[in-house]
Image (cartoon, rainbow, N blue to C red):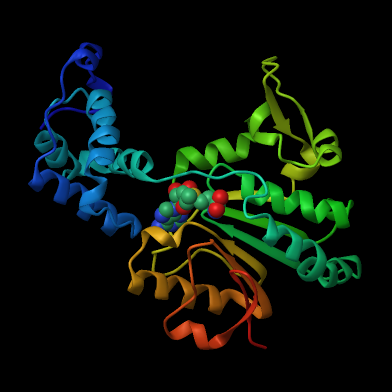
Amino acid sequence: MSASVANADPSVSATRIEGLGDNEFTRIADSIKTEAGICLPESKRTLVHSRVSKRLRATGMTSFREYCDFLDTPQGKAERLELLSALTTNVTRFFREPHHFEILKTVTLPPLVEKARKGGRVRIWSAGCSSGEEPYSIALTLLSLLPDAGKLDVKILATDIDKHILHQGRQGIYDAEDIEMIPADMRRNAFSAAPDGDASKYEVGAAVKQLVAFKPLNLISPAWPVKGPFDIIFCRNTTIYFDAPTQHGVWNGFERVLAPGGYLFIGHSERVNGPAAARFSTAGLTTYRKNS
Ligand SMILES: C[S@@+](CC[C@H](N)C(=O)[O-])C[C@H]1O[C@@H](n2cnc3c(N)ncnc32)[C@H](O)[C@@H]1O
């Protein structure tokens, strides 16, 4: 196998990509399950065909078998990351699931704001942060209560497995329609016209950006490169793609790095279950608190 991104043939974009056979679908699904914990059931075959076809075109290949063989070679390592990026679902938006931000503003953050004002340390983690809308929504909520948060020991860690989406998060540039749901006063204060002069795009301001650090992190890694303890963890709409044992491992990991009494916010269709469940109490809709 000699193909690589470097020798991609642009004429291939016009070439018809073959169908995705059982064997290659299984090889791709197994690879994504091993790398990221993401389960791709048979019902996702059309989606996999469409997204992986783009990777075939980018690498100049026309056969899924050739592509899968390439992934298995040492030279295929970088392409395995591209495949992962192609197959992750990055859907997100500012202030998604608004009830969480209400709890954050009225219940969870006020004591932490007091702690920070007295010189205490406050740490928040957005795990599976996608393109940054979630950690920036947390930062905007925090700044509404603590405008000088940037001068205090307050930090938001934003992690994701997908390096391309992390890059977008760090850039913090969004379409006008993406920031429409942000309350008008917050929007005016926190965003400015994007530097490239495109009037339809806005950039998150420095005061918000400086609170958020974007880092790569795979939630199914046996050891997470995080120190903790965290006062708050958001991990929403990320574990839905994992099987039950993988989810249990993630909940256990969050329980380990959360401070006693720390909050865990999860997605609307997720539940904390398995061995860690006994060490959390419900604190609202899809909101949990680690027992003290
Ligand atoms: C649907 S988005 C959720 C974004 C945001 N939390 C929200 O609720 O709007 C799921 C994110 O999880 C990330 N992800 C998937 N598997 C992951 C893993 N094993 N480790 C870390 N992030 C992962 C994906 O790259 C994607 O950006």
Quarter of image, res 282: bottom right
Q: Is residue 144 left or right of residue 244?
A: right
Q: Position of residue 7 (x, y in %)?
A: 23, 20
Q: Position of residue 118 (x, y in %)?
A: 91, 70
Identity of the residue drawn at 84% across and 55% down: 149
Identity of the residue drawn at 51% across and 54% down: 128
Q: Evaluate whether residue 129 shows in this view.
A: no
Question: Looking at the figure, which quarter contains the C terminus?
Answer: bottom right
Q: Which residue is nearer to you in this view: 179 or 210? A: 179
Q: Position of residue 284 (x, y in %)?
A: 66, 73
User: Relative to 43, is 12 above or below?
Assistant: above
Question: Looking at the figure, which quarter contains the N terminus?
Answer: top left
Q: Which residue is nearer to you in this view: 217 or 190? A: 190
Q: Is residue 236 left or right of residue 262?
A: left
Q: Which residue is nearer to you in this view: 93 or 140? A: 93
Identity of the residue drawn at 89% across and 70% down: 114
User: Relative to 34, is 192 above or below?
Assistant: above
Quarter of image, res 244: bottom left
User: Relative to 67, is 26 above or below?
Assistant: below
Q: Evaluate whether residue 4 shows in this view.
A: yes
Q: Position of residue 238 (x, y in %)?
A: 46, 57
Q: Is residue 263 left or right of residue 270?
A: right
User: Relative to 171, is 57 above or below?
Assistant: above
Identity of the residue drawn at 39% across and 64% down: 221
